[in-house]
Amino acid sequence: MTNTQTMIQGDCLDLMMGMPDAAFDAIITDPPYSSGSSVMNSKSDPRDKYNLSQAFPSFRNDSHDQRIHMLWTIHWLSLALRITRPGGWLMLFSDWRQLPLVSDAMQLTGWTWRGVVVWDKTEGCRPNPGMFRQQCEYILYATNGSRMPGPRCFPAGIFRASIPSRKNRHHMTGKPVALMEHLMTVLPAQSKILDPFAGSGSTLAAAQNLGHAATGIELSPAYYRIACNRLGLALAS
Ligand SMILES: C[S@@+](CC[C@H](N)C(=O)[O-])C[C@H]1O[C@@H](n2cnc3c(N)ncnc32)[C@H](O)[C@@H]1O
């Protein structure tokens, strides 16, 4: 299969501004959640929040306060809408804390919100004494106006998969490739996908497996290199 994956290092807010209208069939992305912002100050490092035994590079834009996070989310979602073709998809990860902010931002920017897929991370998640286990993350999905025709399929709205194991983990908040492939079930063959917050390239790895073309943008030079190595892409000089 030819490699139709591209990684770009830079700030997606700048880069999306220069992209043509209607360039992509789908935006599938997992932006920083800033979900600790009510209890952490703006200098917080995601390495403290996720507190993993495995060492990973840190990343930016995960510690906005709620107002800044709303403005920032509205800004990039507006850019994303313009570069998505009419009828194209948005699939956007969030945790429980930021669900209201993300669904508001999505609707305020003109996306047509259509539902939520639940990622069930299984009982392998850290327990929460006296409380329910925080076992789920969410993928809000929307379209740019009326949905474009796609394959006839009936994918489940809940996907159960453990957080990637040490061996398969390339990012502090890396998502399972099987989950990303499940999200792509509804896309027409050979779609053009953009992941503006690509991290270690899980969206691109799934797109590669399914024969879609994908572009990833990643701000951190360290994660850009990790994604390129993972996907077998040459680093830009
Ligand atoms: C939650 S992680 C994505 C992880 C990814 N789903 C994976 O499986 O590896 C979000 C990523 O967005 C990147 N990021 C933050 N702000 C950005 C920006 N303005 N432009 C591009 N990337 C950005 C961070 O460096 C981080 O790697």
Image: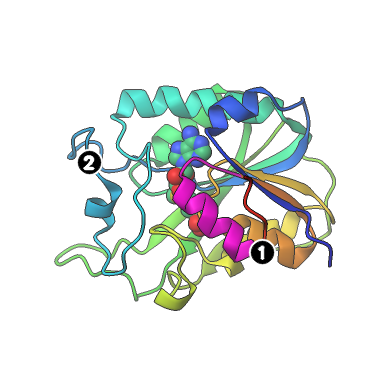
Q: Residues within 10 Å of mark 2 (few under 14, many from 20)?
A: some
> The residue tagged with tag 1: helix, strand or loop?
loop
Q: Earlier in the sequence, mark 1 or mark 2?
A: 2
* Residue 117 seen: no
Question: x, y percentage for residue 51?
Answer: 24, 60
Front position in the image: 166 or 187: 166
Locate the N terminus by quadrant: bottom right
**Which label number is shown at residue 178?**
none
> The residue tagged with tag 2: helix, strand or loop?
loop
Which stretch appears magenta? Answer: 217-231
In the rendered image, which quarter is residue 135 located in? bottom left
**Which label number is shown at residue 44?**
2
Q: Is mark 2 within 8 Å of ligand 1?
A: no
Q: Amino acid at mark 2?
A: Ser
**Which label number is shown at residue 232?**
1
Q: Amino acid at mark 1?
A: Gly
Q: Is residue 85 rendered to the left or right of residue 157?
A: right
Q: Is residue 128 rendered to the left or right of residue 122?
A: left
Question: x, y percentage for residue 232?
Answer: 66, 64
